[in-house]
Image (tube, helix red, strand yellow):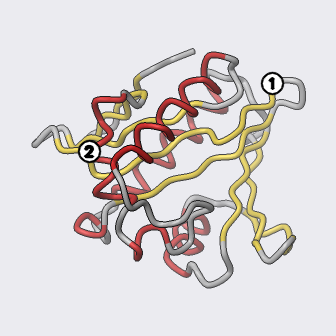
Amino acid sequence: MITELHTERLQLRKMKVSDSSSLFSVWSDPEVTKFMNVSCFTDVEQAKEMIKLLDDLSQDRKAIRFSIIKKESNEIIGSCGYNSLDFDNLKAEIGYDIAKSSWGRGYASEAVSTLVDHAFSSLKLNRVEVKVDPENVNSIKLLQKLRFTLEGTFNDLHMYSRLVDA
């Protein structure tokens, strides 16, 4: 499975344990983790454990998570990836987070559109899903901009999806 993707301004590289301190600074911000399915991190060891867990899932081709790196500065500004890969049903669920200092600059849009394009063109999937808290207005706007469709609300989360273009 691919371990690196590139956009105009970003490098998406499979997470490494050496990224843990940078990712800890993102995941320890309560404003960033407010809508994530994890609690705000309080110790860098939690970031190391998360990266190891995600690496185990990638070894089984069940998920892959990338560090989002700004090409101009080599700074890690967040993460994104396939939270679950289901090749039997040709679908994936994606997730993403961006450091507050990088909000509003289009980085999430750039990273997510690259994940979607890769899912459809290289992984040959037919469906990409995202679960979003209904109060996460910025994420909802991002998904609408990228032509995701709201399918409904399940367990207090909106389910958005996008199907491969026919």
Residue 13: mark in rendering: none
Work out whether residue 91 or residue 13 is closer to the camera in this orientation and state it.
13
Q: Quadrant of the N terminus?
A: top right
Q: Secondary structure at mark 1?
A: loop
**What is the x, y in percent for residue 49?**
48, 38
Q: Residues within 10 Å of mark 2 (few under 14, many from 20)?
A: some
Q: Which residue is mark 2?
A: 21
Residue 13 lies, with reference to residue 23, above or below; the image says: above
Instruction: Write down the quadrant of residue 156 in the picture.
Output: bottom right
**What is the x, y in percent for residue 144?**
61, 69
Which residue is at a point 62% across and 62% down the rendered structure image?
37
Which residue is at a point 36% across and 51% down the rendered structure image?
78
Q: Quadrant of the C terminus?
A: top right
Name the amino acid type tagged 2: Ser
Q: Which residue is mark 1?
A: 87
Q: Nearer the viewer, mark 2 or mark 1?
A: 2
Which residue is at a point 11% across and 41% down the rendered structure image?
72
Position of residue 90 in the picture relative to residue 134 (left or right): right
Residue 31 lies, with reference to residue 149, above or below; the image says: below
Work out whether residue 84 or residue 44 is closer to the camera in this orientation and state it.
44
